[in-house]
């Protein structure tokens, strides 16, 4: 084939309209010195008929790191119009990256409506399937109690002018939409600092990692014994069931209340 003809054929292939649904899905993970520096997903979405009450899309990533399945959810600001292809780049785990390279990440892309949603794409590891759910992460339900949730504080350190905390919630059963993890932090002589986090998207065996600056607490003096209580609420501003209490003095964290 003539060189000019080859170029024209290649250009025609490149300009071909993407198919209906989600296509051209690529990982955008970046590693520096063998450690994850960023994670993300890129794809094109084109719908002939978006939901009547469409509010865009939701991207869900569930990544296996050892025995933990860590989850992040992103809702990029896009508008879906009939027949129009939209290129989407979604950063994931921006605030808390997995502590090590995941052995597998399962991805789901949903169209989000006001009253309903629909699954557009699912990739379980390296296989694409809209019919086969990703296998659950097997986890014991014994320690979860009636809420079906356990929680732990993993890091506490005074940084700059405030107290920095890291904590996580783990679901031992599928949680209901709207479920919340509640953090309540107090230090003697300082204001209390509370935060509410959506965990209603967690399924059995999944965890959400969280990081926060307890701005209202500020920076406690060295050696101050502070307490963080983690709780569960079935809905935003609902009744709180305490899950666990942790005492943290500087960077040392111990389960239970601080000695009085």
Image (cartoon, rainbow, N blue to C red):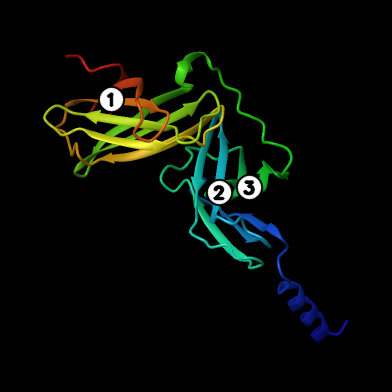
- Alpha carbon separation for disc pair 2 and 1: 36 Å
Percent of width and height locating residue 170: 48, 27
Percent of width and height locating residue 160: 21, 44
Does dot 3 land on a helix, a strand or a loop? strand
Name the residue furthest left.
Answer: 189
Front residue of 128/26: it is: 128
- Alpha carbon separation for disc pair 3 and 1: 45 Å
Tell me if residue 209 comes above or below residue 231 in the rendering: below
| Label 3 vs label 2, nearer the camera | 3
**Mark 2 or mark 1: whose residue is earlier in sequence:** 2
- The residue shown at (61%, 55%) is 51
Tell me if residue 52 comes above or below residue 137 in the rendering: below
Percent of width and height locating residue 66: 56, 30
The residue singled out by tag 2 in the image is 59
- Alpha carbon separation for disc pair 3 and 2: 12 Å
- The residue shown at (30%, 22%) is 246
- For the N terminus, give its image quadrant: bottom right
Front residue of 5/108: it is: 108
The residue singled out by tag 3 in the image is 118
Does dot 2 land on a helix, a strand or a loop? strand
| Badge number at residue 252 | 1
**Mark 3 or mark 2: whose residue is earlier in sequence:** 2
Percent of width and height locating residue 176: 51, 31
Q: Is residue 250 visible?
A: no
**Mark 3 or mark 1: whose residue is earlier in sequence:** 3
Does dot 1 land on a helix, a strand or a loop? strand
């Amino acid at each position: 084939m003539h060189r000019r003809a080859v170029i024209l054929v290649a250009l025609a292939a490149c300009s071909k309209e993407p198919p209906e649904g989600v296509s051209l899905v690529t990982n955008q993970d970046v590693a520096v010195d063998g450690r994850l520096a960023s994670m993300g997903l890129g794809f094109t979405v084109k719908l002939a008929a978006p939901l009547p009450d469409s509010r865009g899309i939701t991207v869900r990533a569930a990544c296996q790191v050892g025995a933990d399945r860590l989850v992040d959810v992103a809702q990029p600001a896009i508008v879906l119009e009939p027949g129009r292809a939209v290129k989407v780049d979604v950063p994931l785990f921006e605030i808390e990256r997995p502590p090590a390279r995941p052995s597998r990440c399962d991805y789901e892309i949903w169209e989000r409506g006001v009253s309903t949603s629909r699954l557009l794409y699912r990739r379980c590891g390296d296989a694409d399937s809209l019919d086969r759910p990703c296998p659950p992460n097997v986890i014991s339900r014994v320690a979860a109690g009636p809420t079906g949730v356990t929680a732990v504080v993993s890091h506490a350190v005074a940084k700059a002018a405030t107290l920095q905390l890291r904590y996580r919630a783990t679901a031992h059963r599928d949680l209901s939409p709207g479920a919340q993890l509640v953090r309540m932090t107090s230090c003697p002589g300082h204001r209390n600092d509370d935060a509410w986090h959506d965990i209603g998207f967690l399924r059995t065996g999944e965890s959400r990692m969280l990081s926060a600056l307890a701005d209202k607490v500020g920076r406690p003096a060295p050696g101050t014994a502070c307490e963080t209580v983690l709780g569960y609420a079935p809905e935003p501003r609902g009744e709180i069931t305490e899950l666990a209490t942790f005492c943290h003095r500087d960077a040392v964290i111990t389960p239970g209340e601080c000695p009085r």
